[in-house]
Amino acid sequence: MHDLPITVAAQTLVLCAERALFDPARATLYIADAHFGKAATFRARGLPVPHGTTGATLARLDALIARHRPTHLAFLGDLLHAVEAQAANAQLRVWRARHPDLALTLIVGNHDRHAGMPDPSLGFALCEEPHRFGPFALCHHPQAVPDAYALAGHLHPSFVIRGRGDRARLPCFRFGATSAVLPAFGAFTGGLDGAAEDDAIYVCADDRVIAVPRHTATSRTLRRLG
């Protein structure tokens, strides 16, 4: 994987191709919108969707942990998708047994309030937004927080790259002057286009994170993705 270091709020942060953000100074991995159990929720509601998405998402998380060796994982809301997703707690317990020393924080999001909190045995610290953490404010909903740079999720941001008759919608990070929005980490999640005029956009393309020229989606950019 080819991660991309950037500087935000005088801090070095690492954009990970797996759609997560690593903070070396605090040995913390930030993850937004895991939505564990979303596919199971859809199947329970009669929609024929693939099996195995929770396992695939946890495998990506394991790869991130192996590469960056965080001591703390901060989930920026929407850990579970819905009440039907509570069955995913069994897989989360197996995953947790592989990483018993990791500190886990959950910023409570809108889906968490409906799905229910994670199994207490997983050992999450539950926090309301905005939660101050060093120079950052950890949030689920994007917002301005006085005297802090906000890290949030909720929007599942994406960006459409166009060029020579081709187009690709890719998950992206959006960084503004006072806040950032992380891409959805979970498999089987949609994306929302759109960004503020001054946002810096970084797309996740296979095993790379690539900076997008602001407000453009040129054929040159598309060729770089190919």
Image (cartoon, grey):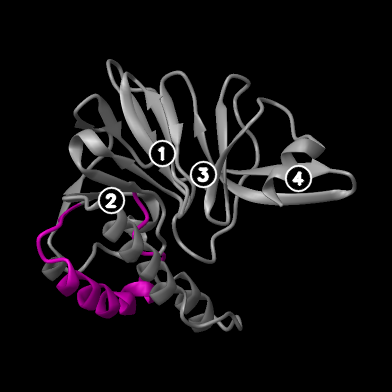
Identify whether 224 is placed above or below 180: below
The image shows residue 144 at horizontal and vertical percentages of 39, 23
**Which mark is first along the chain, 3 or 2?**
2
Residue sitting nearer the eye, 58 or 210? 210
Mark 2: amino acid: His
Q: Which residues are magenta?
A: 77-104
Left of 70 or right of it: where is 170? right
**Which mark is first along the chain, 4 or 1?**
1
Binning the other alpha carbons within 10 Å of mark 3 as few (below 14), some (14 to 19) or many (20 upward) gives many
**Which mark is first along the chain, 4 or 3?**
3
Label 2 belongs to which residue?
68
Image marks 3 and 1: residues in contact by CB distance under 8 Å: no
Residue in the picture at 53% in, 76% down: 42
Mark 3 or mark 4: which is in front?
4
Report the disc number at residue 223. Answer: 4
Mark 4: amino acid: Arg
Tally of numbered tags? 4
